[in-house]
Image (cartoon, rainbow, N blue to C red):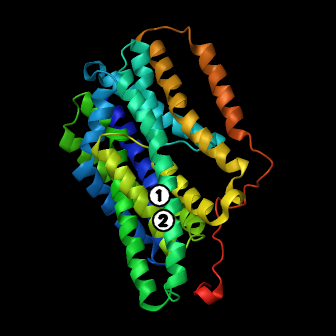
Amino acid sequence: MTILLFIVAFFFAINIGASGAAASMGIAYGSNAIRNKRIALFLCGIGVFLGAVLGGEEVVKTLGSEIIPENIISLHIALIIISSASLSLFIANLSGIPLSTSEVTVGAVAGVGIAFQILYVKTLLVIVAFWIIVPITSFLLAFFANKIIQYLQKKILNLTKGKWSKILAIGVIITGFFEAFSAGMNNVANSVGPLVAAGLLSMEQGTFYGGIFIALGAIFLGGKVIETNGKRITKLSLMQGGAVSGIGATLVIIASIFGIPVPHTQVTTCSILGVGASDLGKALWKKTIITKLVKTWVISPFFSLVISYNLVKVIIQSDLSGLMLFLLFMATVFAIGIWQPKTLTKSQPLYKEKAIPKKLGGS
């Protein structure tokens, strides 16, 4: 059972690195600030590992002891929490639902607490509040940052050429590295928090080994993600991309210092939306964008919560009363996942940069 738990936990960590963490260097790679994909992924791996080791402890404490009491997280409960989060992501991938690893992990922990009727509601409400406040803040900061960028592009005509372009490229690489660092700080707890709470690893061991496996996932399995994310992000200029990465990294690091697990993907998405809204105004707001965000925010925690709750009921408490409700919930979530509004095709990008007139130095 212990071996199985470690396998599931570290497999979860690898997938966190391959999906969410690898995307942090997408702007730098997609804009050709770093032309070699392997170098971009290696830098991402270093950033993720350093973030996990140097700053991952507070979020580990939150997931391990501040949502439910640490003393109820046994070997079996730790396995249920991590398996629920992993299974949620797996099913979501099959049905096309974008889920947040932080949200599914918090949901899995909360599901256990509800099953045992021991849940620190105050802590949970604080976390949910951050899930709303941080993305909104990233949107607003990106909106006003892009206004400043537009002003600078008008005042400095050759801002995107010559030595300025090299400086901007270096800035994008640095902000991408810190975004990877922030991902390590916030996401390492998702895979090792229950292991630390169950007493199977010390805090230092948990952040170290968790950081290693997240970094390995980013380096060796993040190629497709960074390719996809890079192509999408190149719709932004270097300055806009640097602003998106910098804002996301700063907010996630601040949340991590306070021990709050936040959805990194939603933070980045809202930053991109902020830039887009600043450029395009109401034309940006399409139903598909809003639907995708709502799906992710609302479904993610409930998805894993229902799974972990029922696993505790069936495996620990031998109670089969909730199985029909569980199957009904899964069918509902799947239906929501495959539904798409007709107003925007899948091939249409989330946000396309408004062209800068040539007289202002744009291309």
- Toward which corner of the image does residue 344 lie, by quadrant? bottom right
Q: Tell me which residue sits at (30%, 33%) in the image.
A: 62
Residue 66: numbered disc: none
Q: Which residue is mark 2?
A: 145
Label total for image: 2
| Residues at marks 1 and 2 touching, judged by CB atoms closer than 8 Å | yes
Question: Looking at the image, can residue 183 be seen?
Answer: no
Residue count near mark 1 (Cα–Cα under 10 Å), binned few <14, some 14–19, many ≥20: many
x and y percentages locating residue 199 in the rendered image: 21, 29
- Toward which corner of the image does residue 25 lie, by quadrant? bottom left
Q: Which residue is mark 1?
A: 141
Which kind of residue does numbered mark 2 sit on? Ala
Question: Cα distance, mark 1 to mark 2?
Answer: 6 Å
Left or right? Give the position of 351 relative to 197: right
Residue count near mark 2 (Cα–Cα under 10 Å), binned few <14, some 14–19, many ≥20: many
Closer to the camera in the image, 307 or 268: 268
In the picture, the quarter occupied by the C terminus is: bottom right
- Toward which corner of the image does residue 72 lie, by quadrant? top left
x and y percentages locating residue 183 in the rendered image: 38, 52
